[in-house]
Amino acid sequence: MDIAKLAALAAAYDAGDPRRVHHFMKVYAFARLIGQAEGLDEQTQEILDAAALLHDIGIHTAERKFGACGGPLQEAEGPSAALPLLKQAGADEAACEQVCWLIAHHHSPGASDALPFRILLEADFLVNAYEDALPPEACRTARTRLFRTRTGTQYLDDLFLAPPYQP
């Protein structure tokens, strides 16, 4: 699968919505870094990379169909929006199935303990915590309830739970 092509396709899909593009690019960066640090093999990392780029792809469809884009709607609408992009980027059937499963569950933290899934949840939380200016208490709660990897937890601690930077 051509991840650079998939990123370009995802950006074109969300054309005119730079906030969404910036969001998925940041989630992709965190997911990639966490996955590499946690020792994912190349094939698993590629699945994670694709899922990170496309995890919120159902938002626009949900907004058009339902006037809302909450987590369950994103999960429901995401796989059908992702599939054509994955195929254009050269993903095989097995990869499409795995990426679509991750997209369809990325707001359901109890769905799996598989490492790629946990990393996607952590990467998405790290970006959402910043974009939504979550208070430290919400981050402490997520640290206990959501985070499982050493690397993701360290990013959470450093970014949101360490004493604030003082020049």
Image: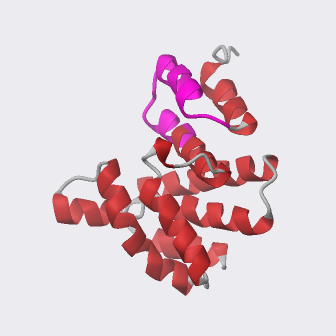
Which image quarter holds the C terminus?
Answer: top right
On whether residue 133 falls in the magenta region, the answer is: yes
Q: Main secondary structure of the magenta part?
A: helix
Region of the chain picked out in magenta, as a range: 126-148
Residue 164: image location, x then y, percent: 63, 16
Quarter location, residue 41: bottom right
Compared with 70, 3 (above or below) is: below
Q: Is residue 24 above or below residue 46?
A: above
Nearer-the-camera pick, 106 or 136: 106
Q: Position of residue 114 (x, y in %)?
A: 63, 51
Residue 143 vertical placement versus 21 (above, below): above
Q: Nearer the viewer, residue 122 or 130?
A: 122
Split into 4 quadrants, where in the image is the N terminus? bottom right
Q: How many marks?
A: 0
* 52 on left or right of 108: right
Q: What residue is at 74 percent from the left and 38 percent from the top? A: 151
Residue lying at 57% horizontally and 82% vertically, measured from the top left: 93
Q: Is residue 91 left or right of residue 109?
A: right
Residue at left offset 55%, top offset 67% = 99
Q: Is residue 39 found inside the magenta-colored segment of the image? A: no
Locate residue 25, reporting x and y percent.
57, 57
Left or right of 84 in this view: 39: right
Q: Quadrant of residue 66?
A: bottom left
- In the rendered image, the vertical position of residue 65 relative to residue 135, given as above or below: below
| Picture colour scheme | secondary structure
Which of the 4 quarters of the picture holds residue 6? bottom right
Q: Residue at x 52, y 39 (%)?
A: 125
Q: Position of residue 163 (x, y in %)?
A: 66, 13
